[in-house]
Amino acid sequence: MKKLSLAIALLIVPSLAQAWPWSQDMANQVSIKPQESVNKAGMKPFPARSLPVAGTTVVTKDMDAAKKMTNPVAADDQSIAKGKHLFDIYCAPCHGVSGKGDGYVGAKLVMTPWNLTNSSELHTWTDNKDYPDGYIWGYITLGGAVMPAYANDLSASERWHVVNYIRKVLQKAPAAPAVSPTK
């Protein structure tokens, strides 16, 4: 009986003192939030004369600004292949592999995803005045009523590859020459 009482006492006493070595490890750890400084002085500023890497960030104010953008990526076989790969990952769940809005996730939505092919009854994709490449790029970037924004998931150039795939494969439009971006 004494041994049992001693064993119970040895188990209870550390718990009363909160001395279990694993009891506070997670609560007392160093935790740094994204873009938060490790030291009190703050994060080091970017070096003088530093420039962003081309194609990594494009700031787009709204759909009107995006609509005016021209596609800087040539619609060659390599771009279309990259676009197909990205479309299959990010777009096909809703828009379907064929681009007609018949994806597995899209079938469960209240609003049917847009038909991205020329068989669409709502959108005449062949009219580049209303739906230029910049419009599609902007919709991928900013999202819409049901569609999420993919600016954080796809780089600017990756979004242009998806536009090239949509235009040249799903819509079978004639190839347009790439326009160099203006500064």
Image: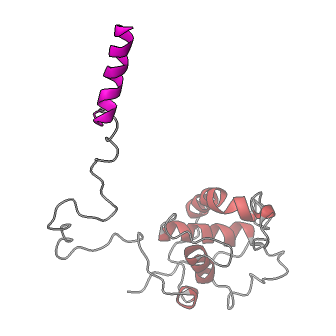
Residue occupying image coordinates x 16% and y 65%: 40
Tell me if 158 is positioned left or right of 26 in this view. Answer: right
The one of 172 and 47 positioned closer to us in this rendering? 47
Q: In front here: 1 or 70? A: 1
Residue 83 x/y as whole percent: 60, 62
Between 141 and 181, the residue placed more toward the observer is: 141
Percent of width and height locating residue 135: 62, 83
In the image, residue 33 lies at what x, y percent?
A: 33, 60
Q: Is residue 162 above or below residue 5?
A: below
Q: Let me know if residue 3 is in the magenta part.
A: yes
Residue with the most extreme front position: 1
> What scheme was used to colour the molecule?
secondary structure
What quarter of the picture does the C terminus occupy? bottom left
Residue depicted at x 55% and y 89%:
68
Residue placed most toward the observer, 152 or 87: 152
Q: How many marks?
A: 0
Q: Position of residue 89 (x, y in %)?
A: 63, 56
Image quarter of the N terminus: top left
Q: Residue at x 17, y 61 (%)?
A: 39
Q: Is residue 139 above or below residue 12?
A: below
Q: Residue at x 57, y 72 (%)?
A: 149
Give the extent of the magenta segment. Answer: 1-19
The picture quadrant where one finds residue 19 is: top left
Q: Find residue 99 and report its image quarter.
A: bottom right
- Residue 141 part of the magenta segment: no
Q: Is residue 114 left or right of residue 87?
A: right
- Of helix, strand and loop, which mostly describes the magenta segment? helix
